[in-house]
């Protein structure tokens, strides 16, 4: 179980800091929830502590580890289906995995595709989501401002 002040990552929303632990009664059962403050987008969400692992909640990576993971996929072969539906489905599955390397692949692949052909509105949104997840983990792990994290991400993928 995570504690107040710990930094964790939600697969769909990104990294945040546990602000509080709250007990709530749901269907007659008292359950503990993490109150997670996500700095990117100033979002606050509640996550069931009992279901956290099943939802893919994990501790953030160390500051150097994050950069290493992101940089390691830069030169990987691009493997994206041409079919829009299949590509979108695969990218969503990668994001839902909660793994930084998978989210980074989604961002990189969509960034390259955007430069070559452009993206549909749905894929632009998916790319933005992937970027937000990466940025939130960079911001918390390296204790940096959003603009610094964006600059670092641009440097890695340039």
Image (spheres, rainbow, N blue to C red):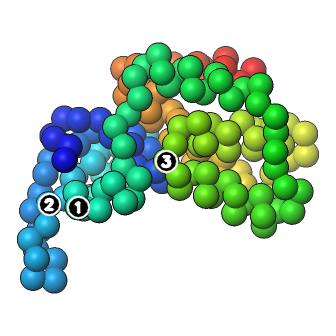
- Label 3 close to label 1 by CB (< 8 Å): no
Q: Whole-Å distance between the Cαs marked 2 and 3?
A: 22 Å
The structure residue drawn at horizontal position 8% and vertical position 71%, both measured from the top left corner, is: 30
15 with respect to 32 (left or right): right
The structure residue drawn at horizontal position 33% and vertical position 54%, both measured from the top left corner, is: 53
Report crowding for label 1: few under 14, some 14 to 19, many 20 or more residues within 10 A (C-alpha).
Answer: few
Please tell me which of labels 2 and 3 falls first in the chain.
2
68 with respect to 41 (left or right): right
Q: Which residue is tagged 3?
A: 98
Residue 109 position, x and y percent, is: 76, 41
Please tell me which of labels 3 and 1 falls first in the chain.
1
Placement of the C terminus among the 4 image quadrants = top right
Most foreground residue, 99 or 107: 99
The structure residue drawn at horizontal position 56% and vertical position 20%, both measured from the top left corner, is: 68
The structure residue drawn at horizontal position 53% and vertical position 55%, both measured from the top left corner, is: 96
Q: Which residue is tagged 1?
A: 50
- Label 1 close to label 2 by CB (< 8 Å): yes
Q: On residue 32, which mark appears? A: 2
Q: Secondary structure at mark 2?
A: strand
Q: Is residue 74 above or below residue 25?
A: above
Residue 71 position, x and y percent, is: 64, 22
Residue 150: in sight, yes or no?
no
Q: Secondary structure at mark 3?
A: loop
């Amino acid at each position: 179980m995570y504690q107040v002040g710990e930094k964790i990552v939600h697969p769909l929303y990104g990294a945040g800091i546990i602000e509080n632990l709250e007990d709530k009664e749901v269907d007659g059962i008292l359950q503990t929830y993490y109150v997670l403050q996500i700095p990117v987008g100033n979002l606050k969400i509640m996550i069931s502590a009992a279901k956290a692992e099943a939802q893919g909640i994990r501790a953030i990576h160390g500051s150097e580890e994050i950069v290493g993971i992101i940089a390691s996929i830069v030169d990987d072969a691009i493997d994206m289906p041409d079919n829009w539906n299949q590509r979108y489905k695969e990218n969503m599955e990668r994001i839902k995995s909660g793994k930084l390397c998978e989210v980074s692949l989604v961002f990189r692949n969509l960034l390259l595709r955007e430069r070559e052909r452009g993206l549909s509105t749905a894929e632009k949104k998916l790319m933005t989501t992937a970027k937000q997840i990466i940025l939130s983990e960079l911001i918390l792990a390296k204790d940096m401002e959003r603009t610094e994290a964006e600059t670092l991400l641009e440097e890695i993928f340039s």
